[in-house]
Image: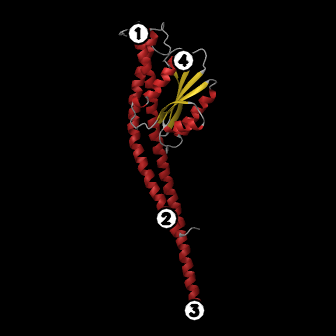
Amino acid sequence: MASAKEIRTQIKAIQNTGKITKAMEMVAASKMRKAQDRVVAARSYAEGVKRVVGNIVSAHNEYQHPFLVERAQIKKVGIIVISTDKGLCGGLNTNALKAALGLMKEQTADIEVFTIGRRAGQFMRRIGAKINGVAENISDTPELSDILGVVTLAIDKYESGELDAVHLVFSEFVNTMTQSPTTMCLMPCPVPEDVKTGYWDYLYEPEAKDVLEGVLRRYVESLVYHALLENKACEQSARMVAMKAATDNAKDIVKDLSITYNKARQAAITQELAEICAGAAAAG
């Protein structure tokens, strides 16, 4: 058994660690609420853009934009993987990267990877994937400009024919305790099939073809940006839960060590008393 002094040192160290994890839990809880608000607001915008795209495509189905046409042969596939920059968020990144790896194994074509978040970049470099675009050190309040370079690169490669499909992998926020790794086909663009058709249409300036070009680009950008916001909400939720579990574990360990410490003290006192009694008996 370790000495009482050593156990006391361990208790102090674990208590300090528990204070740190508790502080991180509170910070994550505060950021989580703000991240959830941003996700809710972004969902409304994303649904609005999706509805507009669906209406335009439905009203002008005679024009097949390249972003909407599925290629006959898939020779090269791009995958945009969104992760966090920092760790200490449980299995969030592990689950998302497993989903990305599963998607990569399903492909029979050559694969190019675009990473958003340091953890995704580290993983893809470790497995030897071909990385063509990287975005890292994204703040907790991300802007579209933070990832616009990566998204634009993927769009331009698809438009020029260098990529035949582009997929997106991210973590979707369900609730505080649940974050779901999600994969979706980004290009060709997913367009809602349940759009109500009718005789009405928008007024275009200069014409529908040019408007559709701009709207579809913004639509793809909004999908990736919304996925980033979902991932940020997942990150703060997962970190809050992980830090709460760490704090609770620290308390349990301190409790167990306190019992061990008391036993060590009692054993030391008993030994000292036995030595005193033995010395008194020998002197008598």
User: Which residue is identified by label 1?
Assistant: 208
Q: Identify residue type, mark 3.
A: Ala
Mark nearest the camera among 1 and 4 is 4
Find numbered disc 4 in the image and state the secondary structure of the residue it sits on: loop
Q: In this view, does 179 lie to the left or right of 37?
A: right
Give how far across and how far down residue 155 sits, in percent: 48, 21
Which of the pair 270/204 is nearer the observer?
204
* Mark seen at residue 109: none
Marks 2 and 3 sit apart, C-alpha to C-alpha, by 38 Å
**Furthest residue in direction bottom, as rendered:** 284
User: Which residue is identified by label 3?
Assistant: 283
Give how far across and how far down residue 41 sits, in percent: 38, 29
Above or below residue 188? Residue 280 is below
* Mark seen at residue 9: 2
Quadrant of residue 270 within the rendered picture = bottom right
* Residue drawn 48% across the image and 58% down it: 14
Q: Are marks 2 and 3 in contact (CB under 8 Å)?
A: no
Mark nearest the camera among 2 and 3 is 2
